[in-house]
Image (cartoon, rainbow, N blue to C red):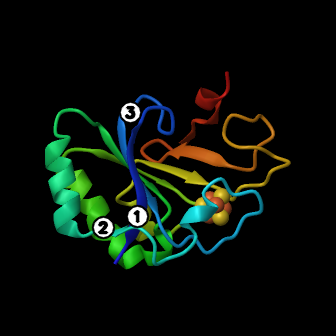
Amino acid sequence: MLRFSEEQIVFQEVPGEVSLAFTIAGCPLGCKGCHSSYSWRPEIGNLLTPDYFSHRLQSYRGLISCVLFLGGEWQAAALLPLLVQARHAGLNTCLYTGLDDVSLDLKQQLTYLKTGRWLEQRGGLNSRNTNQKFTDLRTGQCLNHLFIR
Ligand code: SF4
C-alpha cells in the first residue's frame, strides 16, 4: 500500500487546477539535488488507504478539481485504484514521475503526466532548458509553456 509524507492543496503544479497533492514515500530514483529527499524512505509517513483517500475527497468536494500524486508509480497496483476513485469522483488526475514514461494502465486513468527526473543543470518545468515534460494526456499537448514566466 502507498504511504504519503505530505498532503497539501497546490495551485501551480497543475496549471488551471486546484489540486489535492500527495507526496508518496519511497521514490527509488535518487536524483542528485532532489528537493524531497526526506520522502525517499518507504516507511515514513502515513498509509494512503482507499478509505482515507475517499474521506479526503469527500471533505474537499466542490473545492478541488484535481488530485496530484507526486510519485507512486513504483507501486502501480496500489496507485491505479486511487486514480480510478478520483476519476469516479469527477476529478482530474495528475502524476509527477521521474521516469520518462509510465504504463498505459496508469495513463488511461490520468489527465496530466509530468515526466523526467530532476537534473540540476537542466532545471524544472519553469526552465526552457528542462528535460522534464508536462503533458495533457487528453490531447497529447505539451503544456510546459504554462510554467514559464
Ligand atoms: S524523481 Fe523526484 S522525488 Fe524522486 S528522487 Fe528524483 S527529484 Fe526526488
* C-alpha separation, residue under disc 1 versus residue under disc 2: 6 Å
Marks 3 and 1, how far apart in space?
21 Å
Question: Could you tell me which residue is drawn at 15 percent across and 55 percent down?
Answer: 55
User: How many residues crowd around disc 3 within 10 Å: few (fewer than 14), some, or many (20 or more)?
Assistant: some
Amino acid found under the numbered disc labelled 2: Leu
- Name which of mark 3 and mark 2 comes first in the sequence: 3
- Which residue extends farthest right? 121
In the picture of the structure, the residue carrying the numbered disc 2 is 48
- At 30% from the left edge and 67% from the top edge, which residue is drawn? 48
Q: Evaluate whether residue 58 shows in this view.
A: yes
Dots 3, 1 in contact, CB < 8 A: no
Quadrant location of residue 105?
A: bottom left
Tell me, yes or no, whether the two marked residues, 3 and 2, touch with CB atoms within 8 Å: no
Q: Position of residue 93 (x, y in %)?
A: 36, 49
**What residue did someone put label 3 on?**
17
Nearest-to-viewer mark from 3 and 2? 2
Question: Is label 3 in a helix, a strand or a loop?
Answer: loop
